[in-house]
Image (spheres, helix red, strand yellow):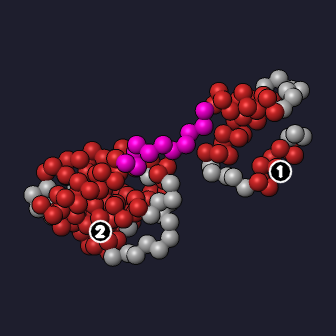
Amino acid sequence: LAQCMEDSSMVPATVEKLASVVFVRAVETPALALTVPVVLRGLAVRQDVVKRKACVIIDNMTKLVPHPREVNPFVDDLLPILATLAEEISDPEARSVAERTHKVMQTAKETEVGQVNKEALLELVKGQIQESVPGLASFVAGLCQSMADCRQFNKETWQGMYSKLGL
């Protein structure tokens, strides 16, 4: 992958190898961070067959993410390119793959990622704790939001956090 980023002549072969990888586990943001730059380069080559394979890779990886938030950092880079390819690729089959991939990415972008409502969370926390220190409720709400954003839902971790705060 690293050599492909340095030498553009290696893009078709690298996309081919990447297309042959069978993903058996969930694909998360770190794996996407390694592969998306290569796939983006694959979408920019002249050969429609390479563009098609790059679209298939994106489509397959997007289907294997456990939550759309894993794809979100890459959606804005991929969507415009996929939209262009869906209209401009000369090969009809490759164009249909690009259209399908564009729809999958668009769906991922539009999927609610479960953002925490900060004001509602603060009100909830204020109702649950006695604010013995000014700003404690805001601090605890911020911790809760950070843990939720990191998808940390282990009960013992939350209890440990609260016990360290004396709550």
Residue 135 in sight from this viewpoint: yes
User: Residue 49, image x and y in percent?
Assistant: 18, 67
Say left or right for 37 vs 88: right
Task: From this view, report whether residue 52 is shown above or below residue 123.
Answer: below
User: Residue 71, image x and y in percent?
Assistant: 44, 52
The part of the image, by quadrant, that contains residue 97 is bottom left
Say left or right for 111 vs 37: right
- Residue drawn at x 40%, y 59% as measured from the top left: 62
Q: Which residue is mark 2?
A: 15
Q: Residue furthest top?
A: 134
Say left or right for 145 vs 7: right
- Count of residue discs: 2
Task: From this view, report whether residue 104 is shown above or below residue 23.
Answer: above
User: Residue 20, image x and y in percent?
Assistant: 33, 76
Per the rendered image, the range of residues in magenta is: 107-117
Q: Secondary structure at mark 1?
A: helix
User: Residue 132, image x and y in percent?
Assistant: 89, 26
Instruction: Give the amino acid type for the residue marked by disc 2 in the picture.
Output: Val
- Residue drawn at x 12%, y 60% as measured from the top left: 92
Q: Is residue 114 magenta?
A: yes
Residue in the foreground of this view, choosing between 81 and 148: 148
Q: Are marks 2 and 1 in contact (CB under 8 Å)?
A: no
Residue in the foreground of this view, choosing between 92 and 72: 92
**Badge 2 or badge 1: first in the primary sequence:** 2
- Residue drawn at x 37%, y 48% as measured from the top left: 107
Image mark for residue 160 = 1
Alpha-carbon distance for marks 2 and 1?
45 Å
Q: Quadrant of the C terminus?
A: top right
Residue in the foreground of this view, choosing between 45 and 98: 98
Q: Quadrant of the N terminus?
A: bottom left
Q: Secondary structure at mark 2?
A: helix
Badge 2 density bin: few <14, some 14–19, many ≥20, Cα 10 Å: many
